[in-house]
Image (cartoon, rainbow, N blue to C red):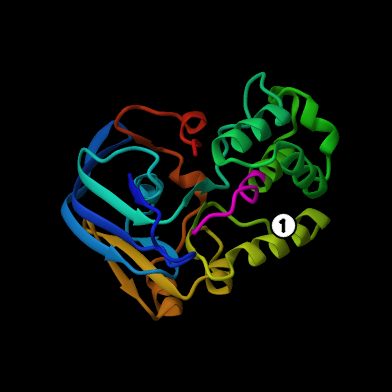
Amino acid sequence: MDRAFAGSPGLIMIDLLSLSDDVTVHGRSIHLFDNLDFHLEPGRYALLSTTPELRRSVLDVLAGLRPPRRGHVRCTGSVSWPIGRNGIASGKATGQDAIELISAIHGLEYPRACELVSLLVPRPDYLDEPFNTWPQYVKQEFNFALGLLPQFDLYVIDGAIPFEESRFTRMWQSLFEDRLVGKSLILSTPRQKQMLDYCTKALIYDGMDFTVDDDLESCIERYPAHSVREEMGTSASAGSSDDAEFFF
């Protein structure tokens, strides 16, 4: 992704220039884009599609996780990784290792980053333990907490925003809403209420093209959300796994 950091904070625009790309779904190659030119204005968008199994791959391209086969994705400002995906919280690395990595990549103060994550997650005692010993719910909360460490101009979220009644949910939502002031958002979630709470427009992927629709509620009715689990069958043509798709 070509990134120019001259834009005003939060006023991030994305340009897709002569974009062509393919993805493999259940062993079958599918065209994602075919020489697409598209300009996305700043805003808060719910990503919807007639082919929800492709939304994950679409986010990969928009977030710059992998380069397209041909063409360019250009944006002004900083873009998050798809927050909510599993990936970094795996293997023998520890939570402290992950915080240190993100701090180094994004120029954060490591002690302050550790302090914030320890404050957010309900089980900070796990941070010194290998990920392969963590319960799944602890990994999920940790992944969302990591997404609030850097401040981005565009937040990309792939999955349901924390919603269960808990201290973590209240604190995470409060901090995320503060982070989101004046910023842009692309949200792919199976929860329709979250689209209406956080988004103002629909970003519709259909027929290898994007359209923007201001009538979000009507679009949600026309493009019913599918669960993230149903989308897990999508992988990049390079055969990357979920654990390899997290990177920042």
| 91 within the magenta span | no
Residue 113 vertical position relative to residue 168 in the rendered view, above or below:
above
Residue 126 vertical position relative to residue 50 in the rendered view, above or below:
above
Quarter of the image for the N terminus: give it. Answer: top left
Does residue 27 appear left or right of residue 34 in this picture?
Answer: right
Q: Looking at the image, how many numbered discs can be counted on the residues?
A: 1
Could you tell me which residue is drawn at 26 percent across and 60 percent down? 206
Residue 180 falls in image quadrant? bottom right
Does residue 240 appear left or right of residue 29 in this picture?
Answer: right
For the stretch drawn in magenta, the main secondary structure is loop
The residue nearer to you, when weighing 146 against 26, is 146
Q: List x then y, in percent, for residue 175.
A: 70, 61
Q: Which residues are magenta?
A: 146-153
Q: Secondary structure at mark 1?
A: helix
Q: List x then y, in percent, for residue 233.
A: 41, 38
The residue nearer to you, when weighing 173 against 71, is 71
Q: List x then y, in percent, for residue 11.
A: 43, 67
Residue that mark 1 sits on = 172
Q: Residue furthest front?
A: 6
Could you tell me which residue is drawn at 78 percent across and 49 percent down? 120
Could you tell me which residue is drawn at 80 percent across and 31 percent down? 126
Q: List x then y, in percent, for residue 139.
A: 69, 37
Residue 79 vertical position relative to residue 184 in the rendered view, above or below:
above
Question: How packed is label 1: few (under 14 Cα within 10 Å), some, or many (20 or more)?
Answer: many
